[in-house]
Amino acid sequence: MIPGFANRRRFKDLSEQEILALAISSEEDDARIYRSYAEMLREDYAASAAVFGGMAAEEDEHRRRLIDLHQDRFGDVIPLIRREHVSGFYARRPVWLVENLGLERIRDEAAQMELDAQRFYETAAANTSDAATRKLLGDLAAAEAGHSEKADALADTHLDGQTRSQEEGAAHRQFVLTWVQPGLAGLMDGSVSTLAPIFAVAFATQDTWTTFLVGLAASVGAGISMGFTEAASDDGQISGRGSPYKRGLAAGVMTTIGGLGHALPYLIPDFWTATIIALIVVFVELWAIAWIQNRYMQTPWFRAIFQVVLGGALVFAAGALIGSG
């Protein structure tokens, strides 16, 4: 079977043997995913890793029961059929995509996995006539529905209130260190450092297209520079700040966005309209930076406003004065 979209089988066209084979491969995949979660969390969140290890063991037990039933009804040879071979069947997000979103996101993803599996078993049971198969699939649907309770029981075993609080605090700190801090530094650099050249060119030439090109070049160049600088400055091994590639990406992208925010209005041909819109964007950018500092970095409002808004105003004034000179 070719796993292309046009060649996928419809679920209603699967035989009972193929439904069992699909259930077996799905349980194998889910067990692998839970073990991957456990492995990636083991170093920093040992208690949560133990929870996912327990959930993987539950999936292994489901797989064994399905294989036993398949052997009884159809023999030892299990057809090769996977999720991607069935049209409309639920898919799993890649582990690498979920791991970048933090501990709570992984927990939410696991809850969605259980709900998807429950729906599959309910549908599979409804499409099966053999009594033993229908009973097992119904039992597995009930088991998947009860997995949230199982997960809670595992969490109670491995995650007391203090441990959970410690893990959530560690996850928040890691998120701030890996994504927020470099992203904020990039946004500040892109928003503030490009003010002077963009508005200097704007007031010197009053040519919106030239101003846009200068702003685009300054923003992209600053983003590339900031991204490489952040990635090369610290590998995260000693500081615990996380992957240098993630930090570099956050810093580079946010630096570029910060500069482009007040460069894009100069795509408008009328100089004063573009400039007024650019100033409004600058005002919003600087207040957004102050809010992020206050929200994630616990910087007092007054200090955040003084550092960002006043600093940005001074840089803008310098660029405007130089461009008007």
Image (cartoon, rainbow, N blue to C red):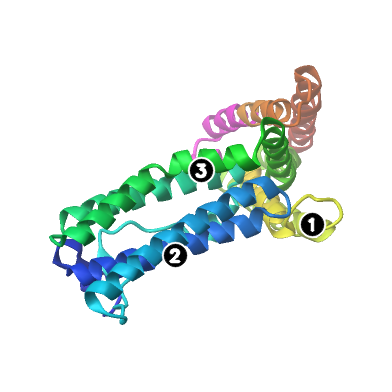
- Tell me how far mark 1 sits from mark 2, CA to CA: 39 Å
Task: From the viewer's perspective, tell me whether residue 78 is left or right of residue 168.
Answer: left
The residue range painted magenta reads 261-282
The residue singled out by tag 1 in the image is: 229
Look at label 3 and name its amino acid.
Ala
Judged from the image, the secondary structure of the residue bearing numbered disc 1 is helix
Out of 226 and 79, give the one closest to the viewer.
79
Residue 259 locus on image (x, y percent): 65, 43
Residue at 53% x, 39% y: name it. Answer: 153
The residue singled out by tag 2 in the image is: 29
Judged from the image, the secondary structure of the residue bearing numbered disc 2 is helix
Q: Earlier in the sequence, mark 1 or mark 3?
A: 3
Residue 277 locus on image (x, y percent): 55, 30
Crowd tier of the residue under label 2, counting other residues whose Cα lies within 10 Å: few below 14, some 14–19, many 20 or above: some
Judged from the image, the secondary structure of the residue bearing numbered disc 3 is helix
Quarter residue 166 falls in: top right
Task: From the viewer's perspective, tell me whether residue 315 is left or right of residue 120.
Answer: right
Quarter residue 53 falls in: bottom right
Residue at 20% x, 62% y: name it. Answer: 11
Q: Earlier in the sequence, mark 1 or mark 2?
A: 2
Out of 194 and 162, give the one closest to the viewer.
162
Crowd tier of the residue under label 1, counting other residues whose Cα lies within 10 Å: few below 14, some 14–19, many 20 or above: some
- Tell me how far mark 1 sits from mark 3, CA to CA: 42 Å
The residue singled out by tag 3 in the image is: 151
| Foreground tag (1 vs 2) | 2
The furthest residue to the top:
302
Residue 212 locus on image (x, y percent): 59, 47
Look at label 2 and name its amino acid.
Asp
